Image (cartoon, rainbow, N blue to C red):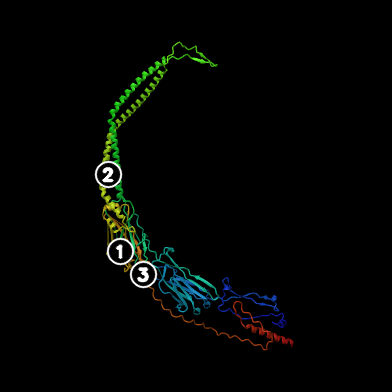
Amino acid sequence: MTEEQVRNNGGKPVVVTFNAKIRSGANLSAYIVDGKTAVPNTAEYVINNNPETKKKSNEVPVYPPTPEGGEPEIDKKINKTLDYLEIARGKSYNYDITTTIPEDIVDYKEFVITDQVDSALQINGDVVVDIDGYSAEGIVDVVVDGQAVTVAVKDFSKLEGRSAIHIFIPATIRPEADLSTYVDNSVPNTANLHFTDGPGVTKDKSTVPVIVTPPTPPTPVPPTPGDPTKTVNTADGNEQAFHLDLLQRTSDFRYDIAYTIEADSQYTAFTMEDTLESVLNIQRVAIKVGSGENLVLKEFAELEAKLAEAKGTLETLEAKKTEITNTVSSVATMATELEAQKVRIAEIEQELAIKEAELATASAASTVAPSTTEETDGTSVVDESTDNSQPVVDKQAEIQALTVAIEQLKASKDQVQQTVVELEQQIEVANTSEASLAALEVEIRNATASIEELEKQLAEKTPKATIAREVEAALLAVNEKGELTEASAAILGQVSIDKATNHVVFDITNPDVLASLRGRQVTMSIYATINPEADLSNYVTDKGIELVPNTASVTFDRNPQTKKKTNTVTVTPPPLPEPPGPPTPLPPLPPVEPPVPSDPPTQPTPPTPPTTPPAESTPPTPGKTLPKTGVAENGMYALVGMILGTLTLVFRRRKQ
């Protein structure tokens, strides 16, 4: 406004009104606060073009309306309505993914639906996409890359007025999939939606996982302790399971029938047999024997040890007998020697008495010289009280010699007496041994009889031990799986296969061979496969699982009353895959009918032109565009013109 306009309109409000709208396709992501979009706007004024006088108005936000349909949602089901499905491997089912289409879809920048199908599953048909039941051709791009399915909208304009995008993914559980790492063998799967809406907001949404799982076969009854056991395994595996899910319908598998022969058994024959179901084909049969000690050879070695011990005992008894006999035969000699020693003692005692008498005489004849005493001054004084009238006779040498002789005689006497004691003891022992010689003779006869019995037993068991050694040698001839070669198995018994009746028999008829296997586990392995042309409809359970059962048995001494049956094991082949049917052609998407208005629209009233042309003035400064939208409407120019025209009329009337 000019200075004059300001002066003339002092105290009056100045109101500027203009029309605006949010630019189509504008990115409003920068205006989202707490999930709500708000576009702010402020005004300002300045006086006399002085920046210091500039003042801003309050901020007023503009809230773009949220479409009635809100954000798009995504949902995933199995066979249209299910969140969980128990279905056999290889059997087809559908994943159904539904994504709602928002009302403002034409303003969207991205709209991509993805589904990463789990590796345990297989997409077994064409992925079909429709929009409200009509063909989506030309509107979306469908890409199937391995396990990944991607559906991306490429023409948003054709989705206006539509409600939902439907995706159908046919799938199966792979027959060979290993589900042991999945919780309860359950395979989850989700779908995802990625979109960027009109205001530029990008979001990702995922569905709740839906679950598929193969049905669980019935739990087999475990074997009774002491009975033969049967397990089923993959051909090269060692699962030792009571149920086996085959990876392929033609996969080889192996039945193992095992029985541990009692260590104290006295069986003379052993038969292990099995009759397979007619839908199975027998590939081959193998025999395996577990580790353990050969009890026949153990018993033979124990007999040999007993014989060696008995012979050693007999040798000891014979030596003792010889010693006693020698001792008894020397009793007379020892008695003579004893008498001689006693005589010698008497002689020594007599001689000793003589020497002692001589010593007494010599001692009495010996005279002692006069005694003297020594005074304190060192002089000697004769003891007058002693009778020194007898002459001095020197007997000391004689006394000393007699004393030595007496001591020697006493020592000789002691030695001879010790010899006498020893001889008396030896004679007493000899007399006692002579009394026990009869008992010793009995022991020797018993030891001899024991040796003869042991030698007899060894002679009887030698042929059995020979067979046992042949068995041990045969058990060493095995393949990489520990199975006996055909030649080795033939040493143990006979394997018979009747493929017409699917009957298999392993028969041990040699009691000595059977005795060598006591305490060991004997296993018959039957390698088999399902006949690819067999009809398994009679083996389908109420849950739709194909279960092929099998039971074996063992019999002893060919006595039917001794037959023991194994537990039952089952085999489940993967189902034959259902070929996916051709997708049903969808009709093309029809155009959306425009809504029919209930009342004709009211025509806007054109503005009334001013009757008086406005006074000349400085052209107004062009209005600013709406912040961040780049949009401005020209309605403000008309408003300014009307204000100026009104002010001119007022000014003229005041002059008049």
Is residue 21 visible from the viewing direction of this image? Answer: yes
Image quadrant occupied by the N terminus: bottom right
Image quadrant occupied by the C terminus: bottom right
Q: Secondary structure at mark 3?
A: loop
The CA span between labels 2 and 3 is 69 Å
Judge whether 334 appears above or below 275 on screen.
above
**Mark 2 sits on what residue?**
454
Which residue is at the front of the view, 580 or 563?
580
Q: Please tell me whether mark 2 or mark 3 is closer to you in this view.
A: 2
The CA span between labels 1 and 2 is 50 Å
**Mark 3 sits on what residue?**
576
Judge whether 402 appears above or below 144 on screen.
above
Judge whether 383 appears above or below 345 on screen.
above
Q: Are marks 2 and 3 in contact (CB under 8 Å)?
A: no
**Mark 1 sits on what residue?**
282
The CA span between labels 1 and 3 is 22 Å
Q: Residue at x 39, y 64 (%)?
A: 216
Indicate which disc, 1 or 3, sits on the residue closer to the N terminus.
1
Q: Tell me residue 138's x, y (percent).
A: 46, 79
Quadrant in the rendering for residue 27 = bottom right
Q: Secondary structure at mark 2?
A: helix
Is residue 559 visible from the viewing direction of this image? Answer: no
Question: For mark 3, does the 10 Å Cα neighbourhood hold few (<14), some (14 to 19), or many (20 or more) residues?
Answer: few
Q: Are marks 1 and 3 in contact (CB under 8 Å)?
A: no
Type of amino acid under label 1: Ile
Type of amino acid under label 3: Leu
Q: Please tell me whether mark 1 or mark 3 is closer to you in this view.
A: 1
